[in-house]
């Protein structure tokens, strides 16, 4: 679920989707060059033209996890603020501490699209003690996961130890 907090237009980087591509097989995802998110290579995309999806402030764009989507350059002088909410069964493998995927599950289920961000549980009858409902607990969980992710990335990518991406910062827009 993608919710723009200001009008999202082509000019300010609205999302583009590939129509009906969610009906295809799961597309191969690989880390981008910086290792900060997963991407689908051009050669792995179905032969469909992307369609821009302008959405007015407060509107909602619903997609499945099989909908290839992207946003492109914001050519305006304003930040395009939005929220991205994802829902998944707590029984499926995630990077949350509540499930440990079997080797078969790990091979069948792709990693989160944004590996530096920690998955977390907000509602569960089976795992009520694992739910995150406190803002400080949420912040600490995400910060700890990000530090572990960056430390692992720095060890695996030469020269990357100088890479600093702070998802809680607005510095990139200043």
Image (tube, rainbow, N blue to C red):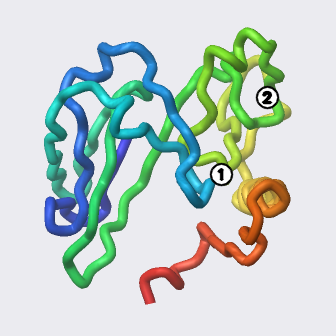
Name the residue at 27% across, 40% down. 61
Name the residue at 23% across, 56% down. 14
Q: Picture coordinates of residue 34 (x, y %)? A: 59, 60
The image's mark for residue 128 is: 2
Q: Secondary structure at mark 1?
A: loop
Whether pointer 2 and pointer 1 mark residues with C-beta atoms closer than 8 Å, the reply is no
Task: Pick out the residue farthest to the bottom.
Answer: 174
Nearer the observer, 25 or 159: 159
88 horizontally vs 146: left or right: left
**Residue on which the image places disc 1:** 117
Q: How many marks?
A: 2
Q: Is tag 2's residue or tag 1's residue first in the polypeptide sequence? A: 1
Image height of 93 relative to 86, above or below: above
Name the residue at 24% across, 84% down. 77
Callout 2: 10 Å neighbours few (<14), some, many (20+)?
A: few
Callout 1: 10 Å neighbours few (<14), some, many (20+)?
A: some
66 horizontally vs 88: left or right: left
Q: Picture coordinates of residue 140 (x, y %)? A: 80, 61
Nearer the observer, 6 or 110: 110
Q: Picture coordinates of residue 148 (x, y %)? A: 83, 56
Name the residue at 79% across, 14% down. 103
The image's mark for residue 93 is: none
131 horizontally vs 61: left or right: right
Mark 2 → mark 1, Cα distance in angstroms: 21 Å
Image height of 160 relative to 38, above or below: below
Q: Secondary structure at mark 2?
A: helix
In terms of image quadrants, where is residue 109? top right
In terms of image quadrants, where is residue 108? top right
Nearer the observer, 85 or 49: 49
Q: Picture coordinates of residue 168 (x, y %)? A: 61, 71
């Amino acid at each position: 679920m993608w919710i723009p907090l200001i009008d999202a237009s082509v000019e300010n980087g609205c999302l583009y989707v590939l129509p009906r591509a969610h009906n295809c097989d799961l597309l191969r995802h690989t880390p981008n060059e910086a290792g900060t998110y997963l991407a689908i290579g051009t050669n792995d995309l179905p032969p469909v033209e992307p369609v821009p999806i302008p959405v007015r402030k407060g509107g909602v764009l619903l997609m499945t996890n099989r909908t290839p989507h992207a946003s492109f350059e914001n050519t305006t002088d304003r930040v395009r603020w939005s929220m991205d909410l994802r829902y998944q069964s707590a029984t499926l493998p995630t990077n949350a501490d509540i499930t440990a995927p079997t080797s078969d599950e790990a091979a069948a289920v792709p990693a989160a699209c944004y590996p530096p961000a920690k998955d977390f549980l907000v509602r569960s009858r089976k795992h009520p003690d694992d739910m995150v409902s406190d803002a400080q607990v949420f912040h600490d969980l995400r910060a700890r996961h990000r530090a572990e992710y960056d430390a692992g990335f720095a060890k695996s990518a030469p020269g990357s130890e100088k890479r600093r991406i702070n998802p809680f910062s607005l510095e990139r827009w200043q």
